[in-house]
Amino acid sequence: MPVDPIPEWVLQRRREIGSRVRDARSERGLTQEELGHLVGLDRKTVNRLETGAYSTLLDHLLLIAKELRVPAADLLR
């Protein structure tokens, strides 16, 4: 059963992962819209992931890591 409300440490990890996605995307020179197009997400969803506003599916994170050419583990570390 999920915990409600979500603990602060989980929210903090979500923001850290989002920050790593943003950094990797910027290094590749992609906009949020371009990354979203590559992985089948809209720009708003990429933005929410990067800011930690929403969690993401593991499937999406794996697709993002592949397009950004980084190991998924680097985004999760």
Image (cartoon, rainbow, N blue to C red):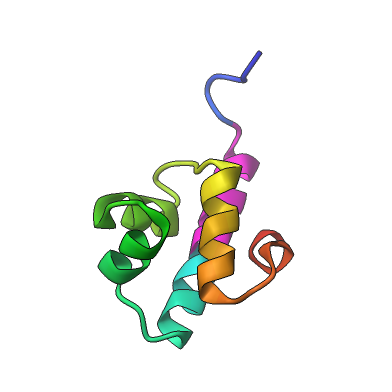
Q: Position of residue 73 (x, y in %)?
A: 73, 63
- Residue 4 in view of the camera: yes
Residue at image coords 51%, 77%: 24
**Which residue range is magenta in the image?**
7-18
Residue nearer the viewer, 8 or 27: 27
Is 58 left, or right, of 41 in this rendering? Answer: right
Q: Which residue is farthest top? A: 1
Q: Position of residue 76 (x, y in %)?
A: 68, 59
Residue at image coords 41%, 81%: 26
Residue nearer the viewer, 14 or 58: 58
Q: Position of residue 20 (x, y in %)?
A: 55, 69
Residue 37 is drawn in which quadrant?
bottom left
Q: Is residue 16 magenta?
A: yes
Considering only vertical position in the picture, is 55 above or below 19?
A: above
- Residue 12 in view of the camera: no
Q: Position of residue 77 (x, y in %)?
A: 73, 63
Residue at image coords 63%, 74%: 70
Residue nearer the viewer, 3 or 66: 66
Is 14 left, or right, of 46 in this rendering? Answer: right
